[in-house]
């Protein structure tokens, strides 16, 4: 399921890897899970993949965020068997989670365009 | 929803920590497995793949720890971990823990006990609906003192004051209840019809009084207390509407008051009847009633004061007044609660201040202990720091420890408070209203909890920051650090001495006041004197001459009791609370007479021999004799201060005086006797006149018998009472008291305050001693090496002792100096409790300073002695 476009770890060492922009991790997780149920590893890989390796999330941060989102009622979780026979915790976005995602996305877009306008004006 | 979910998950995780832990571990493991699988897919061996995955993802333990920190339940868990650790640390040092907990228990317990008293007596409203609206109204005497109200004034106020909703006068009443059981003397009140409305509590069974019941010619009715109803009538509802016999007269029983009803104005009252006054009665203008009123909703106390002031200044034609109740000086209006608590307020607040000082000293003490402990523990903290504990985490750990201590102290303190409150209630003076209601309940427990928490911060913050301050790495493996924060502990010693000095000065001043007060000459020889009040009642003794015969016969019987050497009757007994004063004027009027002082003259109607029995000295003229009876010329004996003030430069013997109304007959003065303290040892109101009981224009219904006994007077009580009853068993004999007890009781409020202050002062002294000792011992222990070097270099033992002592005494001296300055300001709060001693009394200040100095010397002496015995070879061995 996950593509193999990922470079081997050795190659990643010297590449600039960026922390996720403060406060956007939740949004990224919700976005990832909004298409289909995923386990933690899958979410991490997906974010890394789509961002072309710019965002790398360590498991501690990711699991903490998942726990927080689950507590908030935006994600549901259950243990399932993966395709390759391992047990993993799958996360599914809830109705409240979708609403939250829509809200955060709109908010984010507004900010980004505002910052873009500011930078253009400066230039 | 989200909050509930968060709580539920958190509690779930707390309840089954292993499951939550496993969950996270499994998830992290899954990450590893997937990462390793990818590496394997690229051809790495199992082992290499796993290693690469670990390298990529970091330590799984680190990840787990990071996740663990999320959620409130983990903060709780961390707290419990800290708590377990704190408990372990404290258990490991039981001596320290016991001293700290005990010290805090004394401080918190004392504070909680006094808070309970203050809360119940001063803060909580009286047990009536809208109790804040109940006020007491008093007339004002020429000299500004408050005076009982007259019926005439009360009637006028009831008609004219719009700001008062209900208004009722009252006077005490002690009827004898006759019936199937033996006669019983009851505490009762004659009250205005609105009395229960004023209080806002009505009978639960039957009905309250109505206006018609309060008319002079109305049928006799009564309301009784729940206690009397259960005791005498077996809680039988059928008794309502029946007749009961009080003082030999039938009263229709109207109602029963509720079970919990508290009659705070006259506790112990069991029966009420309407006053039944009208203006035609001679008593209508007598100053002998108390007035309570309920303020109309919406009106405040200021409004009532203004209105009554206006009414007092503007007499109305419909309400003519008499000269002695003309309200020229206005009226006093006071909230009932303030009225009841006014006399004990200063003492209680002084107690609260004192106990606050003790608590502060206790906190300072424990803070000092923690500070010393922190210094010893720098090594341990350094290790924890090296293992990754942050600065904030260490402070939190240390604060948890002080919280643990103070919670233990608080719990023990509550136990102390429960016992202390019991002692407090048992020792409380009669003047402490609602003392029986004082318990350690909700608000007091809350207080103890809040105080404990505050104490935890107070004792914990400084030591916690001091212990973790600086670079802890240097402390690893080095054992105790050099004493770098001695200044902090020195400051604590100074603070402690200062606080203790303030407390000791307060106690010292009060102690000297009580000594002075008890040394005051009451004017009679109280040892060996016994007094008892005979209250006659019933139609049988209605007639003056019958009553006189009864009293004479009773007195004869009392004189026959073995052990009685002398006995007499009097209308009032000194220092018993009796307060019977009349106007007195020389006849004809004297030019030199400055006139009646504000208070009037104490009138004693006595049988011959009263003055001799009491041991009041005759200064001039003669005693009253048995020949001065009803048929003989009227004679009087006056007190020395009356003679001095009203007959300046004259010999009063042979002059005539009129006592009471203008139409009363004159008495010829035949003698002058010494002054007697009638109302209080602290007051100088010695103007008194003694008249033969049989020559007064009416015969008192209540007379007291005064007995001079051989030996202990208390044991004669049954025999004397029996002697009176042998004449007429239906008459009440009450208020038996040894005169010595009455004298002592007169200083009771101050003595109560003194007793408590003495306990607090002692506690403070002990705490300060322990504090100084602890601090100096700690310093000596820390400086053992240095002292050893000094000794090795030739310092004499004397020099070393002086070194340590100087330190202790310098700190004490500084504390004393600061304490004196503070006391000068702080003693202002207890000025009203002092008698015959200035709040700046140098003897007290010097004595207290010397006492503290002595304690400091002892407390510093032991560590100094220890320092002198330090082996000079020690530092060499230690290196």
Image: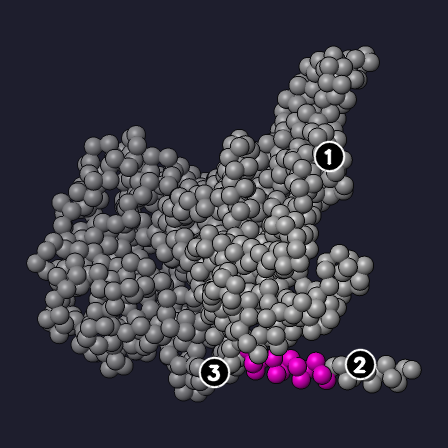
> Which callout, 3 or 1, points at the residue further toward the start of the chain?
3
Left or right: B276, with B377 as reference point: left
Indicate which label's residue lies in the foreground, 3 or 2.
2
Question: Compared to B133, does B749 lie above or below?
Answer: above
Q: Residue at x 13, y 70 (%)?
A: B237
Tell me whether marks 2 and 1 sit on the same chain.
Answer: no
Q: Residue at x 29, y 58 (%)?
A: B268
The span shown in magenta is A97-110
Spatial CA distance of label 3 from label 2 is: 61 Å
Mark 3, secondary structure of its residue: loop
Q: Which residue is mark 2?
A: A115
Q: Which residue is mark 3?
A: B298
Mark 2, secondary structure of its residue: helix
Q: Which chain contains the residue that carries disc 3?
A: B
Spatial CA distance of label 2 from label 1 is: 50 Å
Q: Where does residue B833 sit, x and y in percent of width and height?
A: 54, 49
Q: Please check the rendered image and state whether residue A101 is part of the magenta-colored stretch, yes or no.
A: yes
Residues B873 and B593: in front is B873
* Observer able to see residue B618: no
């Amino acid at each position: 399921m996950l593509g193999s476009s990922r470079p081997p770890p050795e190659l990643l060492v010297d590449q600039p890897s960026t922390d996720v922009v403060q406060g956007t991790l939740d949004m990224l997780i919700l976005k990832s899970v909004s298409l289909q149920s995923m386990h933690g590893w899958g979410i991490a890989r997906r974010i890394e993949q789509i961002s072309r390796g710019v965002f790398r999330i360590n498991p501690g941060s990711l699991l903490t965020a998942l726990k927080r989102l689950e507590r908030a009622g935006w994600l549901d979780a259950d243990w399932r068997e993966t395709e390759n026979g391992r047990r993993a915790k799958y996360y599914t976005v809830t109705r409240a989670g979708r609403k939250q995602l829509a809200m955060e996305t709109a908010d984010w877009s507004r900010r980004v365009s505002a910052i873009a306008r500011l930078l253009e004006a400066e230039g | 929803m989200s909050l509930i979910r968060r709580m539920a998950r958190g509690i779930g995780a707390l309840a089954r920590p292993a499951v939550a832990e496993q969950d996270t571990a499994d998830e992290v493991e899954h990450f590893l497995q997937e990462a390793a699988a990818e590496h394997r897919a690229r051809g790495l061996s199992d082992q290499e793949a796993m290693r690469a995955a670990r390298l990529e993802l970091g330590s799984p333990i680190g990840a787990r720890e990071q996740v663990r920190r999320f959620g409130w339940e983990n903060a709780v868990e961390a707290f419990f971990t800290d708590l377990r650790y704190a408990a372990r640390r404290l258990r490991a040092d039981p001596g320290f823990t016991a001293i700290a907990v005990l010290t805090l228990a004394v401080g918190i317990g004392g504070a909680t006990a006094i808070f309970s008293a203050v809360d119940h007596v001063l803060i909580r409203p009286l047990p009536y609906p809208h109790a804040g609206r109940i006020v007491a109204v008093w007339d004002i005497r020429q000299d500004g003192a408050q005076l009982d109200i007259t019926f005439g004034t009360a009637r006028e106020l009831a008609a004219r004051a719009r700001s008062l909703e209900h208004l009722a006068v009252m006077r005490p009443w002690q009827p004898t209840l006759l019936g199937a059981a033996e006669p019983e003397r009851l505490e009762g009140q004659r009250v205005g019809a609105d009395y229960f409305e004023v209080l806002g509590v009505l009978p639960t069974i039957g009905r309250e009084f109505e206006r018609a019941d309060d008319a002079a010619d109305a049928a006799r009715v009564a309301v009784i207390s729940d206690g009397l109803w259960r005791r005498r009538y077996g809680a039988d509802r059928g008794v309502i509407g029946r007749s009961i016999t009080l003082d030999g007269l039938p009263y229709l029983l109207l109602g029963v008051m509720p079970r919990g009803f508290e009659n705070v104005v006259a506790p112990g009252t069991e029966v009420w009847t309407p006053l039944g006054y009208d203006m035609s009665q001679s008593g209508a203008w007598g100053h002998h009633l108390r007035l309570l009123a309920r303020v109309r909703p919406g009106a405040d106390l200021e409004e009532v004061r203004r209105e009554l002031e206006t009414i007092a200044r503007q007499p109305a034609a419909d309400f003519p007044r008499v000269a002695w109740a003309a309200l020229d000086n206005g009226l006093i209006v006071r909230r009932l609660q303030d009225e009841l608590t006014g006399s004990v307020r200063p003492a209680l607040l002084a107690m609260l201040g004192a106990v606050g000082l003790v608590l502060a000293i206790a906190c300072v003490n424990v803070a000092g202990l923690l500070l010393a402990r922190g210094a010893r523990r720098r090594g341990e903290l350094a290790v924890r720091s090296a293992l990754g504990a942050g600065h904030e985490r260490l402070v939190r750990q240390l604060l948890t420890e002080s919280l643990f201590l103070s919670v233990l102290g608080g719990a023990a303190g509550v136990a102390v408070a429960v016992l202390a409150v019991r002692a407090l209630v048992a020792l409380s003076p009669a003047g402490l209203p609602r003392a029986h209601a004082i318990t350690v309940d909700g608000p007091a427990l809350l207080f103890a909890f809040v105080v404990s928490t505050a104490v935890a911060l107070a004792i914990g913050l400084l030591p916690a920051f001091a212990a973790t301050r600086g670079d802890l790495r240097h402390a690893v493996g080095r054992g105790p650090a050099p004493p770098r924060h001695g200044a902090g502990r020195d400051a604590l010693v100074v603070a402690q001495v200062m606080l203790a000095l303030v407390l000791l000065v307060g106690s010292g001043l009060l102690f000297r006041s009580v000594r002075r007060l008890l040394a005051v000459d009451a004017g009679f020889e109280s040892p060996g004197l016994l007094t008892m009040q005979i209250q006659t009642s019933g139609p049988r003794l209605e007639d003056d001459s019958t009553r006189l015969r009864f009293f004479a016969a009773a007195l004869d019987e009392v004189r026959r009791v073995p052990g009685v050497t002398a006995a007499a009757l009097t209308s009032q007994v000194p220092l018993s609370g009796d307060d019977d004063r009349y106007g007195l004027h020389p006849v004809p009027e004297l030019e030199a007479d400055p006139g009646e002082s504000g208070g009037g003259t104490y009138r004693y109607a006595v049988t011959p021999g009263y003055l001799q029995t009491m041991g009041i000295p005759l200064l001039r003229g003669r005693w009253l004799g048995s020949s001065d009876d009803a048929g003989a010329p009227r004679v009087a004996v006056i007190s020395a201060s009356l003679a001095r003030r009203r007959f300046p430069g004259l010999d009063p013997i042979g002059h005539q005086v009129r006592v009471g109304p203008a139409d009363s007959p004159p008495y010829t003065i035949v003698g002058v006797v010494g002054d007697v303290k009638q109302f209080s040892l602290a007051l100088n109101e010695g103007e008194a006149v003694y008249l033969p009981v049989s020559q007064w224009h009416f015969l008192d219904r209540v007379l007291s018998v005064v007995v001079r006994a051989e030996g202990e007077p208390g044991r004669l009580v049954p025999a004397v009472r029996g002697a009176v009853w042998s004449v007429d068993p239906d008459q009440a004999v009450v208020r038996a008291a040894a005169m010595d007890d009455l004298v002592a009781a007169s200083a009771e409020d101050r003595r109560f305050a003194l007793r408590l202050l003495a306990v607090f002062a002692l506690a403070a002294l002990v705490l300060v001693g322990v504090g100084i000792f602890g601090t100096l011992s700690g310093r000596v222990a820390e400086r053992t090496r240095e002292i050893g070097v000094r000794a090795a270099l030739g310092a004499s033992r004397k020099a070393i002792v002086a070194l340590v002592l100087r330190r202790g005494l310098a700190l004490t001296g500084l504390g004393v100096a600061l304490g004196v300055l503070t006391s000068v300001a702080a003693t202002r709060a207890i000025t009203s409790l002092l008698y015959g001693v200035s709040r700046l009394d140098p003897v007290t200040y010097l004595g207290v300073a010397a006492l503290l100095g002595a304690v400091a010397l002892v407390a510093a002496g032991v560590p100094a002695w220890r320092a002198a015995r330090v082996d000079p070879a020690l530092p060499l061995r230690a290196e």
